[in-house]
Amino acid sequence: MHRSHQGPRRGVRHPCPVRADGPQCRKVRGDRERLLLKSLAVFVTLASATPLFAADAAPPYQADVLRLSEVLGAAAYLDSLCGSPTAADWRAKMAALLDAQGLEGPARRPYVEAFNRGQRTFSIAHRTCTASARGVLQRYFAEGAQLSDRLDQRFGRTGDSPLPPAR
């Protein structure tokens, strides 16, 4: 029977219940929180950078943001599959990214497609939360953090940044 529901299956236990406090559970929650915070910083940075580029030219950070969108989609699916109580945060971060860039209509489409592709790819391969799914999720947390760091380093508000100073 095919499940259209993207959430965790009943009876599948999350490896780190909400109140669990073992070292592995603290690491999973810490990785998740770091990626969420870094993603938020990137969204704020990119919101300021968007007007600096011509409307018809792709911004120089587009490839990294598209990949980050796909990583967020994969994290949303896998986190939900494994029963995380914060799984809905990924969709909210994606919405914040799109809103921060002021994207509408056709300009918004590639980012939404990348997010959905991330979800769809893993919904085909992973139907239950397994050790493999948790491993993929950890790798995606790391990749998302790297993308966020790279975007922040290249387009963040440092002394040599092409962005105007914060108001």
Image: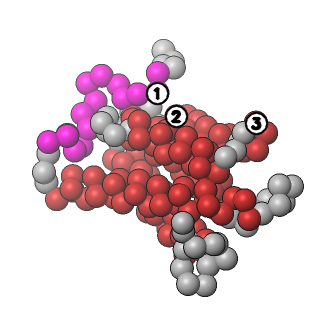
Magenta segment = 5-19
Q: Residue at x 58, y 68 (%)?
A: 151
- Report helix, strand or loop for mark 3: helix
- Report helix, strand or loop for mark 2: helix
Q: Amino acid at mark 1?
A: Gln
| Tag 1 and tag 3, C-beta contact below 8 Å | no
Nearest to the observer: residue 17 or residue 133: 17
Q: Position of residue 16 (x, y in %)?
A: 22, 44
Q: Earlier in the sequence, mark 3 or mark 2?
A: 3
Residue situated furthest front in the rendering: 167
Nearest to the observer: residue 143 or residue 97: 97
**Residue 133 position by quadrant:** top left
Q: CA distance from mark 2 to mark 1?
A: 8 Å
Q: CA distance from mark 3 to mark 2?
A: 26 Å
Q: Position of residue 106 (x, y in %)?
A: 79, 39
| Tag 2 and tag 1, C-beta contact below 8 Å | yes
**Residue 38 position by quadrant:** bottom left
Query: Measured along the vertical axis of the image, is residue 60 above or below residue 32?
Result: below
Q: Main secondary structure of the magenta part?
A: loop
Report which residue position mark 3 lands on: 105
Query: Measured along the vertical axis of the image, is residue 44 above or below residue 5?
Result: below
Please tell me whether mark 1 or mark 3 is closer to you in this view: 3
Q: Residue at x 60, y 44 (%)?
A: 99
Viewed as shown, does residue 36 lie left or right of 21? right
Residue situated furthest right in the rendering: 56
Report which residue position mark 2 lands on: 123
Report which residue position mark 1 lands on: 6
If the image is split into quadrants, where does the C terminus sit? bottom right
